[in-house]
Amino acid sequence: MPWIVYVIAISILRGVGEAIKRTRQKQPRGLCADCTFVHMQYGVTGRNAVFCTFGGGVREVKLDVLYCTDYCDRSAVPRLVRIGFAPEIQRVS
């Protein structure tokens, strides 16, 4: 009879251990983490503060962003465009 108590106690401890492991899993990063316009502050406790700097101001973002109309990927290669009407310079031979 006492071995049944041990089996039940071990199964309960395994269940508690799995529940703790699920809650401690790393949360996915929001869209803002890879944006050009983000200012992030990381705390020692694992918490972070996210601020959006689009448009010149600094605004705190209090939620995890799934979609943003002003998102600009910071790892993308910048697009080079020609501005103005200057003629191309010809090579001198």
Image: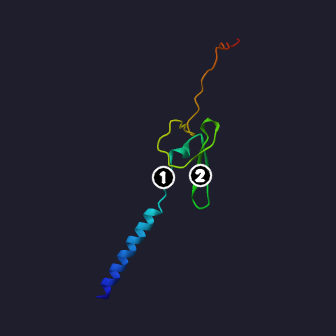
Task: Pick whichever of labels 2 and 1 is earlier in the sequence.
Answer: 1
Q: Dividing the picture into quarters, in which one does residue 13 lie?
A: bottom left
For the point 54% across and 49% down, which residue is it?
Answer: 62
- Label 2, label 1: how far apart the Cα atoms are: 15 Å
Residue 58 lies, in percent from the top left, at: 63, 42
For the point 58% across and 29% down, which residue is it?
Answer: 79
Count of numbered tags: 2
Residue 40 lies, in percent from the top left, at: 61, 49
Q: Residue furthest right?
A: 92
Look at mark 1 in the image and give the residue it sits on. Answer: 28
Q: How is the image coloured?
A: rainbow
33 versus 3 height, above or below: above
Q: Nearer the viewer, mark 2 or mark 1?
A: 2
Give neighbour class at mark 1: few <14, some 14-19, many 20+ (Cα, 10 Å).
few
Residue 19 as seen in the image, left or right of residue 45: left
Label 2 secondary element = strand
For the point 49% across and 58% down, which residue is it?
Answer: 26
48 versus 85 height, above or below: below
Mark identifier at residue 71: none
Give amino acid for label 1. Pro
Q: Dividing the picture into quarters, in which one does residue 72 lie?
A: top right
Look at mark 2 in the image and give the residue it sits on. Answer: 49
Give neighbour class at mark 2: few <14, some 14-19, many 20+ (Cα, 10 Å).
few
Q: Quadrant of the N terminus?
A: bottom left
Residue 30 lies, in percent from the top left, at: 50, 48
Q: Residue furthest left?
A: 1
Residue 47 as seen in the image, left or right of residue 7: right
Give amino acid for label 2. Ala
